[in-house]
Amino acid sequence: MPEITGGTRLVGVMGWPIAHSMSPPMHNAAFCQLGMDCCYVPLPVHPDDLPQAVAGLRALGFVGCNVTIPHKQGVWGCVDQVSEDAQAVGAVNTLIPTENGWYGGNSDIPGFLWSLKEAGYDPMGKGALVLGAGGAARGIVYALAKSGAQVHIANRTVARAETLAAEITGLLPTAQIESLPLVPRALRAAGDGASLVVNTTSLGMWPHADRSPWPDGLPFPRHAIAFDSVYNPLRTRFLHQAAQAGAATITGLKMLVYQGAVSFEWWFDVAPPTDLMYAVCLQHLGRS
Ligand code: NAP
């Protein structure tokens, strides 16, 4: 923990519950390494108290704040301006103070793209298969389509995939997005043309680590990169299936760390030590 002084600048994360968030340890480790007199605190905020909590941030002199489940949509009414990305996906996860009040941004989108770039993957002109059509899929499909990928969304409830495809196409008229059911025949066809397969379903998340959205018996496209938004456990069954087929893999922990790093840069205009932040999260996962 950094030493708290009279001049310590505060940032934090609002959620409900928030006790298990990895953001405080990863940001505080970065402050220590950079010698910054700052502290990142978990802020348990009941949904009924969100407007007062956001107003209180300014009164308490916070330099910025993250917002997580269940407030990513509710915080909308508490900010004065919203970024284009946050508006597109309907979710704010970072509050930045400005002269005109709070500015709401979404660092999940650049955080996801950063993890692809690190793996040497450029979505432009490529085929991407996204499994799932919930909240995480919304940001990921938008990020991929905006980066020029041709996206297939496969979801158990296909109507939800169709709605998501229509909404993102409404925002990005040149986007190429198709929807399909999460069944082996459809996945085989879409997987053949995909160089990236992303799991955005919650399948495989602890304590149900034996589950995967990729059907048993269907060969994983071995030339594709597999990305799993689930990060607990780190090595999910989905990533294991991909690795066994010879595919490269990216863990969801990368996205978690990079969204934090992007927020950090927005607040302080300083690049944080992402390797250290990743190591701290790994340690934290190991303990939980
Ligand atoms: P969500 O909105 O509840 O969506 C869940 C998705 O999983 C839906 O597409 C749902 O399909 C599908 N699903 C659930 N159970 C299923 C089953 N038994 N069979 C097939 N599909 C099933 O959840 P979310 O907010 O998108 O979160 C999804 C995952 O992303 C979570 O594990 C979360 O921790 C992770 N996440 C990670 C990061 C990161 O930084 N790495 C960021 C955000 C989220 P239906 O539509 O058919 O119900």
Image (spheres, grey):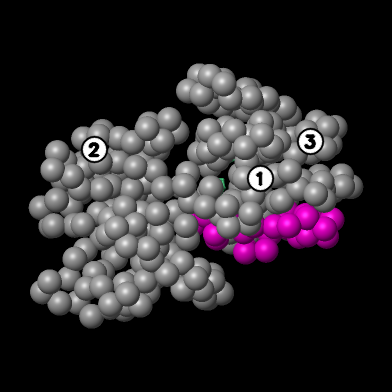
Q: Quadrant of residue 273?
A: bottom left
List the residue tagged with mark 1.
Answer: 198
Stretch of the chain drawn in magenta? 233-256
Q: Position of residue 186 (x, y in %)?
A: 80, 31
- Residue 185, given in percent of the width and then of the height, sits at 85, 32
Q: What is the distance, in whole Å, between disc 1 and disc 3 at their CAs?
A: 14 Å
Identify whether 211 is placed above or below 188.
below
Q: Residues within 10 Å of mark 1 (few under 14, many from 20)?
A: many
Q: Mark 3 and mark 1 in contact (Cβ < 8 Å)?
A: no
- Few, some or many C-alpha atoms within 10 Å of disc 3 (few <14, some 14-19, many ≥20)? some
Q: CA distance from mark 2 to mark 3?
A: 41 Å
The residue to which callout 3 is attached is 193
Disc 1 or 3, which lies upstream in sequence? 3
Image quarter for ligand 1 equals top right
Nearer-N-terminus badge (1/2): 2
Residue found at the very far right of the displayed protein:
217
- Asked if 180 appears above or below 132 in the picture, the reply is above
